[in-house]
Amino acid sequence: MFEVAELGHTVDKSAYKEKSAQLRTELLTIQNQLRGCPFPVIIIISGVDGGGKGEVINKLNEWLDPHYMRTIALSEASDEERERPKFWRYWRTLPSKGTIGVYVGSWYSDPIAQRVYQKSDDNTLQAELNQINQLEELLTNDNALIIKCWLHLKKDMQVKRLKQLAKDPATSWRVTDKDRQHLGLYDDFISVAENVLTETSKAAAPWLIVEGSDNRYSSLTVGQHILERIRRHIQRHEITVLASADLAEPPASQVEQYNLLDALDLSLKLEKSSYRKQLEKYQGKLNELSRHALAAKHSSILVFEGWDAAGKGGAIRRLTESMDARHYQVISIAAPTDEERAHHYLWRFWRHIPRAGKVTIYDRSWYGRVLVERVEGLAKAEQWQRAYSEIINFEEAMLAHGIVIMKFWLHIDRDEQLERFKRREQISYKQFKITDEDYRNREKWSDYQKAVNEMIARTSTSKSPWLLVEANDKYHARVKVIKAYCEALEKMLDEHN
């Protein structure tokens, strides 16, 4: 694979000066066009030690407008990063639409290093690469452009390059003990790298292998490649926009729906005296269990979905009454902000993943993609249909990190909802909760019910099931939610004792 980057390519100084001036102009021009495009550009610069990664990245920063690009240098994970799923550190740094992010150290760095140092085996590496492919597919499906460049050096050239750097007082600091150690692992590193590049070079995100022995050649080659990839991506986007009016929407889901919601017994209720006793019991239990989970550094994510006025807020308050406010946060999800719209729809949820032992409660969540965005036409059919698998993969990343995930759907019937709307209008401190949009949504009850049923059928897994809560009686709903969370915490703590 790497023979193409061992041919001794060079560029003389005069030719480089002429070509780099022209390339810089073209890059700035295409970067200006990119600013108006609804997709980000993610550039990954990787390769062997001494391959000139730093020189290439410095040139990109010199040639491009720094206002609309960012270099993300990631090395050893911090304590904050280790307490969250491994992709959290990458999601939070992803560039917004219309901008460029250059990664020095990416999601490839750790899997390669772990395998080279024999801290993982081939099966573990393959599992890591599968997750990387999932991540890149998710991003490219959302129209992100991923450009991956690998700078290669032959073994003798690597030795020569590191010696040159070590001799020069201005660059000697760049040669570390780890670099010298890597010299002895060159063959192992190349073997692992070849496997990684083969497994992750896909049509939408291929690897470019560049010879790194001459910095002028590698900088020009990477810069020209970036220019052409961005140019082609913009052209494809423009063609897609022009043709979109003539393209038929993908067919709606053909899943035969059986009505899970109508099967719920909404007559279930608790008398007030029984409610108070059970609430006190389970709130006391939750207080104790949440403190144990914090001490054991086991996080939780609680997702609340349901009809308008179904009692999500009331259930959340009864949960948080028995928890330490320093160790949980409630995230209320509404329409995305401009910043959030400039990223993948999952970006705003990755940002709030809790640290070890903490709890994040979502009042509405990522399921908006397959509910309100589907029903209201805010997402294309291909987008919300694709979201089922994207959501499952997202939750699997949380579960793999040991996070407890609970998903509650609070269900009421239409008559109960209307009664609650009317009561809210009569109570001064609840009037803000009722809007014209709430009444308008009632007209699409059947559409939402269909979407909810499909959501449950397609995203309720053995490790992350939906809990359907009969919520016509608020007392019953609140106790069921708290009891279920206590049981989940007990199970998790027992498994880890």
Image (cartoon, rainbow, N blue to C red):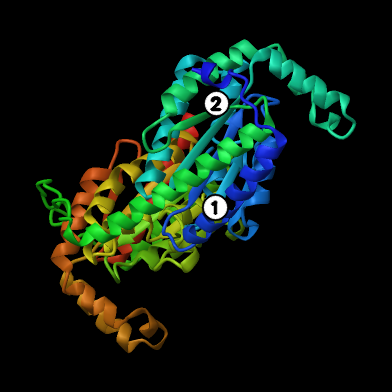
Judge whether residue 124 can be spotted in this image.
Answer: no
Q: Callout 1 environment at 10 Å: few (<14), some (14 to 19), or many (20+)?
A: some
> Residue 371's spot in the image, x, y percent?
26, 59
Identify the secondary structure beneath mark 1. helix
Residue drawn where x is 25% and y is 83% of the image: 422
Near mark 2 (Cα within 10 A), the count class, few <14, some 14-19 or many ≥20, is: many
Residue 346 location, x and y as percent? 42, 52
Identify the residue shown where x is 50% and y is 55%: 30
Q: Amino acid at mark 1?
A: Glu
| 260 sits to left or right of 497 | left
Q: Which mark is residue 35?
A: none
User: Closer to the camera, 456 or 298?
Assistant: 456
* Residue occupying image coordinates x 68% and y 25%: 49
Q: Position of residue 191 (x, y in %)?
A: 54, 14
Residue type at tag 2: Pro
Q: Is residue 243 left or right of residue 26?
A: left
Residue 317 visible in the shown view: yes
Q: Which mark is residue 111?
A: 2
Rendering quarter of residue 229: top left
Does 40 sit above or below residue 461? Answer: below
- Mark 2 and 1 residues: CB-CB less than 8 Å, in contact? no
Q: Nearer the viewer, residue 344 or 154?
A: 154
Query: What is the count of numbered marks?
Result: 2
Q: Is residue 294 above or below residue 474?
A: above
- Whichever of callouts 2 and 1 sits on the residue coming sooner in the sequence is 1
Residue 126 placement, left or right of 439: right
Q: Which residue is mark 1?
A: 26
Q: Nearer the viewer, mark 2 or mark 1?
A: 1
- Residue in the image at 44% along x and 46% along y: 145
Q: Nearer the viewer, residue 155 or 316?
A: 155
- Mark 2 to mark 1: distance in Å? 35 Å
